[in-house]
């Protein structure tokens, strides 16, 4: 008897400051990355939607193709269980490449869409 199993791999990592945390999911049909910047200053990377009644400017989500989405939801301040992405490290996960530096974290998907996150600046491209 053969059994079909759905399989997904999930990786988590954070910057050495523990201020940026990411989860990457990879399945047969694609991948996604979700990053949270806990403490941030400055103008959010995208304007707050009129219907957003929660925290804004902290959560970024992209699929392996397509544009970045920012999430309107309560900020999760969980600081446990993440692998450390040392400054200078570059990781490739599914359809993404992320680079951690002292300036911040930059992640891009296969289309070149992505984000740069630091305490002072958050940018979507």
Image: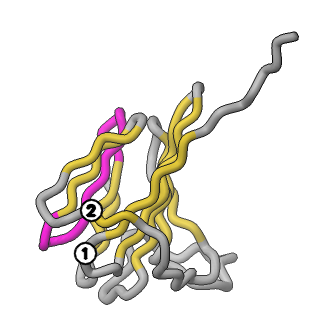
At mark 2, the secondary structure is loop
Task: Sort mark 2 into few (<14), some (14-19) or many (20+) by Cα contacts within 10 Å.
Answer: many
- Asked which quadrant contains residue 40, the reply is bottom left
Residue at left offset 54%, top offset 32%: 30
Residue 37 in the image: state x and y as whole percent: 40, 76
Q: Nearer the viewer, residue 80 or 46?
A: 80
- Whether residue 47 sits left or right of residue 39 in the image: it is right
- Asked which quadrant contains residue 89, the reply is bottom left
Q: How is the image coloured?
A: secondary structure
Which residue is disc 1 drawn over? Answer: 16
- Asked which quadrant contains residue 74, the reply is bottom right
Residue 114 in the image: state x and y as whole percent: 34, 51
Determine contact: label 1, label 2, CB under 8 Å: yes
**Which residues, given as a range, are shown in magenta?**
101-113
Q: Is residue 74 magenta?
A: no
Which residue is disc 2 drawn over? Answer: 85
Q: Nearer the viewer, residue 59 or 27?
A: 27
Cα distance in 3D space between marks 1 and 2: 7 Å
Using the image, tell me which numbered label, if any, was put on residue 39.
none
Residue at left offset 51%, top offset 64%: 70
């Amino acid at each position: 008897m053969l059994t079909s199993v759905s399989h997904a791999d999930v990786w988590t990592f954070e910057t050495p400051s523990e201020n940026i945390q990411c989860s990457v999911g990879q399945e047969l049909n694609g991948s996604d990355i979700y990053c949270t910047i806990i403490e941030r200053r400055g103008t959010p990377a995208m304007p707050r939607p009129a219907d957003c009644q929660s925290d804004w400017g902290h959560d970024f989500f992209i699929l392996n193709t397509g544009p970045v989405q920012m999430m309107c939801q309560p900020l999760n301040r969980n600081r446990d269980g993440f692998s450390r992405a040392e400054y200078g490290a570059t990781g490739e996960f599914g359809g993404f490449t992320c680079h951690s530096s002292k300036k911040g974290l930059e992640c891009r998907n296969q289309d070149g869409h992505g984000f740069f996150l630091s305490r002072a600046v958050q940018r979507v491209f």
